[in-house]
Amino acid sequence: MSRRGSARENGAPMASTRKALFEAVPNISEGRRPEVVAEIVGAIKSSGGATVLDVSSDPDHNRSVLTLAGDADALLAASLALFEAALGRIDLRTHKGEHPRMGAVDVLPFVPVRGATMADATALARRAGEAAAERFGVPIYLYAESATSEARRLLPDIRKGEFEGFAEKILRPEWKPDFGPAKVHASAGVTAVGARPFLIAYNINLGTNDLTIAEKIGKAIRASSGGYRFVQARGIPLEGRGIVQVSMNLLDFRKTPIFRVFETVRSEAERYGVSIVGSEIVGLVPQDALLAAAEHYLRIEGFSDQLVFESRLDAAL
Amino acid sequence: MSRRGSARENGAPMASTRKALFEAVPNISEGRRPEVVAEIVGAIKSSGGATVLDVSSDPDHNRSVLTLAGDADALLAASLALFEAALGRIDLRTHKGEHPRMGAVDVLPFVPVRGATMADATALARRAGEAAAERFGVPIYLYAESATSEARRLLPDIRKGEFEGFAEKILRPEWKPDFGPAKVHASAGVTAVGARPFLIAYNINLGTNDLTIAEKIGKAIRASSGGYRFVQARGIPLEGRGIVQVSMNLLDFRKTPIFRVFETVRSEAERYGVSIVGSEIVGLVPQDALLAAAEHYLRIEGFSDQLVFESRLDAAL
């Protein structure tokens, strides 16, 4: 009740640095041979401290998305193990699939999750890209937040022409790789490596079956039509439930937080006499994004994650 | 944006059990000799996997409160190391202090923080109490949620008479210890061991200097005058800021959640035309208590902490 009574106010100093935690989401050009994907995942698991949170293969795309977590050193080791395992097993010259691709390891983004900045993630992307280029001779393009020019920020711009077109594209001065030779790896192509914010897939369900309301709200909040800078949104029907949904990607939850998007959707919906019946997180959400909502709604003064038992424990370990 | 696009929807199964995390908050009857406290803390640190989050000594009380975290096995080992170190260094026959006490290790509560139930904490309290009684011959009383009778639920009832009175009290049939001999340990007295919920010290600041409003709201929400079952509350002035505060202990945040208390305080304050200007957490708060607030305000459907990146990582490790 009082500060006087707290057992934790005057204690020993805590570790002042939090352990940096990153996500890596490599996309590899193999989605039809489960045994090959399993071997690559096994190589990552054997590489050290990285944890494989998820593996999702799509046979039509002939592509798999891996979700890894760990500190910078662990993800660097995992990245090199990934390249080595993929290069021995994936040959782009015989690869076919619906999804555009340019490399055996097609794209390798690093995401700061906790206790790490975008600059930290960029440094990690540069280390991983440089090491992969040196060790395996794969040309590396830095993209997203770690891009070395605006022309290389967006993945589709880099990937245009795909594996088959890169033999010519890589010779153009403006497409000289950031690391590695200006020559496509014969079987493994080229790879985009970069840093980007955590992407949260978040949907808000409205108490109406009127799709035009969800569409109007989507338009109001998305960046492309004047809404929040880091929001993509559209209205979709939820057939089974007879209601509609504002379906969103939150591209940078630190700059456009969940609670602000939620409150704007609520305000816009109210204008039509419609209420929010619920929301859903698809995939995973960083703890910080939810703690920020608690801090906002509870109006907590001087909030820090060091007030959270588990975070304090993590910092003390 | 769509479930189709999520990388994590169809992945490998996750570990289905979360790692059980407990807090232990031993109170020892030594707060004047820092070197003795340091030796006892050192013994705990050497005992295995428990982490010492905080040590707070009060010379007037001649008492120290330790905050430990870990799984059941780690806290069991830490408890035995604590008893051994304390028994060799603390003699109640010569101990003086303002705070009532009955043992060298006076009270040892175990608190479920995450992935553990009150039944788990009670099982841990029984294991620790039984082992300490067997190994060191200290009589143990189970209290709080693990009490074996209503008469032993409240610590003041057990502690009444203190060390000096226990030689006689322990002989009464109704005060036969739960574990160990019906004979006070010559130097270490007796110990209360138990399980209790996490206590959150939470204060809400009001935009007024009228203390009577904070007092009325405190009365409205606290259990003793008809409010929430697990809330203690009172109104106090915040001298420096010229405002008043509703100062609270939330004794069981799973049954009386923070957000509900906050909303009731808001509603009661509005009746006086007063707004909430902020709130504060004193000490530590379990992650689950804040995630519950985020879930509530964002109306998240099907919420589970396995949607949280860090929790998923913890479960996968």
Image: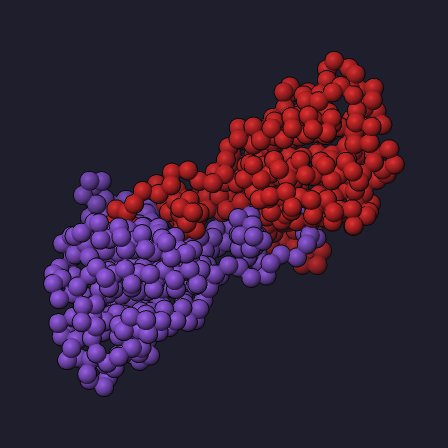
Chain colours: A purple, B red
Q: Which of the two residues, B184 or A210, is positioned nearer the viewer here?
A: B184
Q: How many marks?
A: 0
The residue depicted at 53 percent of the width and 55 percent of the height is A305
- The answer to whether A177 is drawn above or below residue A291 in the figure is below
**Residue B215 appears in view:** no
Q: Is residue A215 above or below residue A168?
A: above
Q: Residue furthest right?
A: B94
- The quadrant in which residue A153 appears is bottom left
Q: Position of residue A171 (x, y in %)?
A: 19, 83
* Quadrant of image for the N terminus of chain A: top right
Q: Is residue B264 left or right of residue B28?
A: left
Q: Furthest-bottom residue in view?
A: A173
Q: Position of residue B7 (x, y in %)?
A: 27, 53
The residue positioned 24% from the left and 64% from the top of the image is: A87
Residue B205 point in image, percent of width and height: 61, 52
Residue in front for this viewpoint, A296 or A109: A109
Q: Is residue B193 visible?
A: yes
Q: Is residue B18 left or right of residue B124?
A: left
Q: Residue at x 25, y 46 (%)?
A: B10
Outermost residue to the top? B173
Residue drawn where x is 64% and y is 19% of the image: B149
Q: Is residue A207 left or right of residue B39?
A: left
